[in-house]
Amino acid sequence: MARDAVLQVAGLQTHFFTFGGTRVVRAVDGVDFTLREGETLGLVGESGSGKTTTCLSIVGLLPRAARIVGGAVVFEGEDLTRKSQRELRRIRGRRIAVILQDPMASLNPLFTIFRQVAEPAFFHQRLRGRSLRERVQSLLRAVRIPSPEWRMREYPHQMSGGMRQRIVGAIALAGGPRLVIADEPTTNLDVTIQAQYLDLLKDIQRDTGVALIFVTHNLGIVAKMCDRVAVMYAGKIVEQAAVRELFDAPKHPYTRALLGSMPKLGSKEPLYSIRGQPPNLANLPPGCSFHPRCPDVMPRCMTEEPRDFRPGDGSVARCWLLGDVLARP
Amino acid sequence: MATIPANTRLAAERTWTGRLAALVKAAREAPLAVVVILGGLILVAALADLIAPYDPTLPVKGAEIFAPPFWMEGGSLATPLGTDFQGRDILSRLIYGARVSLIVGLMGTLVAGGIGTALGIVSGYLGGWVDQIIMRVTDAWLALPAIVFAIFLAAMIGPSMWNIIVILGAVYWTRYARVIRGEVLSLRERDFVKLAEIAGASKLRVIKKHILPNVLNTATVLASLTVGVVIIAEASLSFLGVGVPPPQPAWGLMLSEARPTLMAGQWWLTVFPGACILLIVLATQLFGDWLRVRLDPQTRNL
Amino acid sequence: MSSPVLEVRALTKHFPVRRTLLGGPARLVKAVDGIDLAIGAGETLGLIGESGCGKTTTSKLILRQETPTSGTIRFEGRDIASLKGADLMAYRRAVQVVFQDPFSSLSPRMRVGDIIAEPLEIHTDLPHAAIEERVGRVLELVGLAPDVAPLFPHEFSGGQRQRIAIARALATDTRLIVLDEPVSALDVSVRAQIINQLEALQKKLGVSYLFIGHDLATVAHISHRIAVMYLGKIVETAQSDALCARPMHPYTQALFAAALPSHPDDRAPDKPITGEVPSALSLPSGCRFHPRCPSAIPVCSQTEPALRRREGGGEVACHLYP
């Protein structure tokens, strides 16, 4: 893994300020990770874990109530948190692309596919006329849209869900990005279409060497797509490891519980069920945020927040259990 | 994600005193000016018999006609806002006029809201030809100019305060019917309505238990915005002589009676009732805006 | 299986599509096109398929939200199309549904207790105290405290709301619950809770489930038997274990190939099938799956295969298995 780091997120903190700043919600609270060229990072978590806010912080698309209050997002050597909105817009169009869950929300129903896919090439690469048309067709071909020369004259509503999501993919690729952030891009797709789409993303990544952040709650997608995984809980990364490490030897009880609660094909064993509900970020328990739901909770967990432990196999986990293991001779 | 709160809060909400407390709390959150104006007007209207210095329908004994307000030359503190062409006390007439305006405004809105909400729910929930008929009638109704239509009705059934209420109700229900129908159309597709139907609930029960409670917010907001419109319509009708019949004091009527004297420089006859109409309409509109934001669960939960 | 609780025979539902302005011929969408199903007492039948395969229409037909074009649905031996009055009410009492979106299925203006009590209020004239007691009991059944009854739905998270929806479905003497993707909208850590709860309730109460889903692993986990639907037809049905051990229909195989791995080492090497589900307006000739089928043979585009007994129990509709 001597490849260059495309993205380095260090100590990122993004808080929401509501009710005129009287209530602070720590949606992202100290997140670190590094992403290399051609690598896929899975950002896993439940609703409210801060995975989406982390991504929005990276690209500077936070809602008005949210602010980055600490940490750095270094993309190709530049700290994005210090950039103006205008500079960020240029970076977003070309070097970082975002794919969202609902393709219909990303596409303008009034414009043809051609116009929407052509936009980045038109503005950033200043292509015109024939070369622009050829560029659009090659992009559509890259995302496996059949007969692109016809399809590009159609409108989004004439496409199926899977096709729309691939068009969004084509727009994302148009600027030749180094980093693509995909936020649950397949949630609304049928299983066979989802499989096609995921394979397509893999192929594109192999061809272009783009780095990929995959935001998802689905560990199956992680198992299929990712090289490394960061598991988020209540605004923090509780465990980060290579994907095989994580599935073979999960360190954090939350990761273990997530893996245990996943139904496996052909197995009728009862699922492991995590007790309780996902936490309310506005009202987090003291100590480790997971302790009220943790099966291995210790007295220490209720008062003291665990630090990062590195058990030596390249993984990082925030859990006092590891402290005990490591302390033992 | 919400956590389950202590049951104490809940118990409090269920008692009458608790509800009253919640109401007071809500009133304190409302914009101050609105609460002061509306609360003041309601108080004045309710206590008109106690506050008003004179009988509004009879000339004040010993007072001149067209007496100016007290701070002008020839004015007197006995009739602080002056007198009209019959020598009646303007202040007393304004006070009793508030009663007329509020009663007509609120009752007219209630009638309009009742008709419109009922038709909107029936139309939206039953659909089919019932919907078609109700909506075509609504369209036809909307095509009629409201005031002309109201004048026509008033001329037909004769002017009186209660007739005006019925007339304005009959004129202004269309907006409710359309908005509520739209709301019901989306509610009808919600799973909890389907669940009730699958559980065997009758149409009446679905409307009563599931549709009506979920459109009440919208209806309330619409109502608060309609009150002002109805008050203005009442004033217009009274001004045109087909509204509240004289000598009953109504603000629109006072304006109408003052019309011939406007050029003569007796401004107090028009300015005071005009200002009252302006104030109450403004206050109800502001109240409606505030209510809309407050009742919208999306903004409330933030 | 002795006598099934629910028996569906040759069920068909066609929706007419409105003519175009130019007056083209009226066309039919064959949403459900002759399917047979049976669910035994205490059994879970999984109905799996992609969007547009007719699984939702099937559930609507069973719940009598739609009337079938042809075919019969028998519940405990009686044709539900002929039910009227008291018999219909008895059916409404015995068959309930849990929908996917727990935020849409609970009225925001009703208290949890009233939501659960609604079927009881409709069907019984129990006194208030008895209803309250029953509500408390079903709340406990689904793992909630009885004293949440006076709360409003917005005070609960998605998983808790889904429990409330299940409690409501159990309030009457329910024999069959249609579970329409009941866990798809929930957080992962909560899905397992709900699935385990549903399984435990079935063991305890002997209620039957029709579990509709698109996620193979979840459906296979909870179901005893599975029926795979494609474009209004059932293409394969078998015991859950048998189906997982050896999916036979190429579409079932495609679903398995597209299923997400449970471990990075299981990343499927085989490519998923290509193409998308065609429009139900213009069905392919012969076998509906043949345009996407990797092992299609000439006969597939000409004659439609019938369901035949398959090895290891169950049935499959494919020319590859004569």
Image: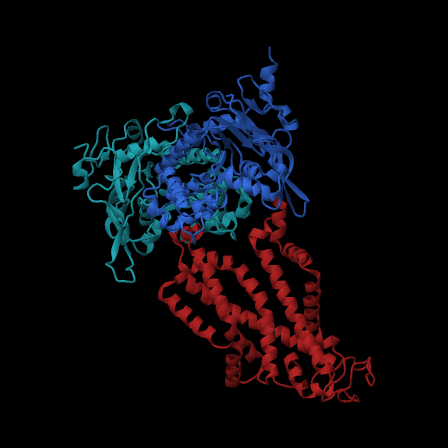
The color chain C is rendered in: cyan
Judged left or right of residue A292, residue A229 is left
Q: Quadrant of the N terminus of chain C?
A: top left
Is A224 above or below relative to C291?
A: above
Residue A117 spot, x, y in % from top left: 43, 45
Q: In which quarter of the image is residue B246?
A: bottom right
Spot the blue chain and give its letter. Answer: A
Residue B2 spot, x, y in % from top left: 57, 42
Q: In which quarter of the image is residue C310?
A: top left
Does residue C134 appear in the picture of this structure?
A: no
Depth check: C226 or C16 in front? C16
Residue A244 spot, x, y in % from top left: 46, 22
Depth check: C237 or A153 in front? A153
The color chain B is rendered in: red
Does residue C200 appear in the picture of this structure?
A: yes
Residue A317 spot, x, y in % from top left: 56, 24
Depth check: B23 or A200 in front? A200
Is A101 above or below relative to A272?
A: below
Q: Which residue lies furthest to the top in this view?
A: A329
Is B261 above or below relative to C23?
A: below
> Which residue is at 25% across, 59% downward?
C24
Is A324 above or below relative to A215?
A: above
